[in-house]
Amino acid sequence: MAEEKKLSGPDFAEGVSLSELTDREMVQGHASGEAILVARCGDTHFAVGASCTHYGGPLAEGVKAGETVRCPWHHACFSLRTGGALRAPALDPVSCWKVETSGGKLFVREKQPEKKRPAVSAKAPENVVIVGGGAAGNAAAEMLRREGCSGGVTIVSADDATPYDRPNLSKDFLAGTASEEWLPLRSTDFYREHQIELLLNTRVAAIDPRKKSVRFADGSDLKFAALLLATGGEPVKLRIPGVDSPQVCYLRSLSDCRAIIGKAANAKRVVLIGASFIAMEVAASLTNRKLQVHVVAPEAVPMEKVLGPQVGEHLRRLHERNGVVFHLQQSVVAIDERGVALKDGDAIEADLVVIGIGVRPLTDLAERAGIKTDGGVLVNEYLETSIPQIYAAGDIARWPDPLTGDHIRVEHWVVAERQGQTAARNILGGRDRFDQAPFFWTTQYDFTLNYVGHAETWDTLDLDGSIEKHDCKLSFRRGGKTLAVATIGRDRESLESELTMETAVQAGCA
Ligand SMILES: Cc1cc2nc3c(=O)[nH]c(=O)nc-3n(C[C@H](O)[C@H](O)[C@H](O)COP(=O)(O)OP(=O)(O)OC[C@H]3O[C@@H](n4cnc5c(N)ncnc54)[C@H](O)[C@@H]3O)c2cc1C
Ligand code: FES
């Protein structure tokens, strides 16, 4: 959530001594009532807004890399020269100020006008169709316009809501600490102003790569010069008796979340089936709504497979301290109006059941169109599928990870948005590789973990610091190579790990 701006540090209008500005550290101060970050790059100084335009993260606590600054909270990246939001999850730029030096001091002067619209891209296709109005689809449409695409841009979305902040559905919004107004990524006016056609509640039923068109459920067609597939995933469905009962919910969309909130209002006890990230975030949020929460899951330690046993155990204890009851190494075999029946013969009374046992990528459209898939839509480093002019991004894309050489697929918000942005640049004729280190975060109560890289398996897990004190770094290694780093309360180290991974990839020595 955006924080209220507090002014601190030097008043840059009065000047700050140049000797205080080093290449390594950035300085936060203010001028004319606005929080400003000053950074030095060699002989050049920059002054930009101090708060990230995503959730208001403090950029001064982030990391400077070349002429960019990366946000400590969810790793957005801004240009210090132009303020431009170079990498999601921030979609808007930060402001820039003019700086002057005299008498050994630096002064921040007037705010620079916002950058004008870009020159029209010469290589823009006549029209781009984007299937999916989620993280990847929205970020792609915005980037097409930002990069000067003058042709038609259409987002076709099966959802009935304008693109929204999906990660929030299991966090503040579900907990009742953020209102629904906070969820849309953009207003409907934004899409109108940027001439992005948004077809909501509209499902693409088929793709005809030969005719270069998509077919809607009503049989009508829409031609495309370039197509981006960004259909995301759907919750894995549980097949047990009673699973279609009205008190049973899944969580993927805003309407799913509204349904859970509506049912939670009259419920006393909820059973969560599964100990996935989403399920555990739902557990934390529903305890905030004063529900008794029970979690039934087959694993012995929640989230051990992704985060290792120590973090998993810590999370279990954290949830238990908040009143959550775990039924681990267990499964639900049936649901009825009184609650759930467990495999061992026990039963748990419940008036709400939320299933969170994983996500299945929606690849069927691609498969039926003859696009190569392998548990995801296969793309190359430019996010091109096996059919020319058809790209894929987000939860459905399986791309070559430059760090390991493996083709990987992840379900991370930031990755989906950044892939949408990369695909958009390539649709406009760029040759932009997707070689960024994957990043995700999870928040449960006061616990926030940032994770960079991707480690499906590891042979060594090093812990530096204390998980209990929320001050640590965990390195997941295989064959001596660091594949992923998780941090709790060490945001800078998370950013530094991201930079190290990306530097290794760029140097070709990953
Ligand atoms: C509750 C929840 C919490 C999460 N929290 C986090 C988090 O904390 N951190 C994190 O990194 N990630 C999180 N994620 C994961 C993250 O939201 C996803 O990785 C991301 O949304 C994927 O983006 P996407 O664009 O690929 O798909 P989505 O955002 O799912 O968008 C897909 C879109 O495609 C549409 N669609 C599907 N099929 C069709 C069709 N045939 N025709 C037209 N439209 C279609 C859908 O309606 C939807 O609009 C969370 C996910 C959920 C559900
Ligand atoms: S607050 Fe900066 S990336 Fe989220």
Image (cartoon, rainbow, N blue to C red):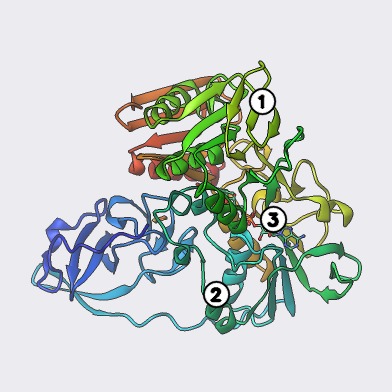
Q: Nearer the viewer, mark 2 or mark 1?
A: 1
Q: Earlier in the sequence, mark 2 or mark 1?
A: 2
Instruction: Please say whether residue 510 is visible from this viewpoint.
Output: no
The image position of residue 58, as x and y in percent, is 30, 56
Against 62, residue 509 (above or below) is above
Against 161, residue 383 (above or below) is above
User: For the residue marked with disc 1, what is the amino acid?
Assistant: Ala
| Residue matched to label 1 | 341
Q: Secondary structure at mark 2?
A: helix
Q: Earlier in the sequence, mark 2 or mark 3?
A: 2
Against 406, residue 217 (above or below) is below
* Distance between the alpha carbons at the discs numbered 1 and 3: 45 Å
Against 356, residue 118 (above or below) is below
Q: Tell me the quadrant of the picture where the C terminus can be found.
A: top right
* Distance between the alpha carbons at the discs numbered 2 and 3: 19 Å
* Distance between the alpha carbons at the discs numbered 2 and 1: 53 Å
Other residues around mark 1 within 10 Å, as few (<14) / some (14–19) / many (≥20): some
Disc assigned to residue 504: none
| Residue matched to label 3 | 383
> Does the CB distance between marks 2 and 3 fall below 8 Å?
no
- Judged left or right of residue 2, residue 484 is right
| Residue matched to label 2 | 146
The image position of residue 402, as x and y in percent, is 61, 42
Q: Earlier in the sequence, mark 1 or mark 3?
A: 1
Q: Residue at x 78, y 73 (%)?
A: 225
Q: Residue at x 20, y 62 (%)?
A: 6
Q: Nearer the viewer, mark 1 or mark 3?
A: 1
Other residues around mark 3 within 10 Å, as few (<14) / some (14–19) / many (≥20): many
Instruction: Please say whether residue 343 is visible from this viewpoint.
Output: yes
Q: Tell me the quadrant of the picture where the N terminus can be found.
A: bottom left
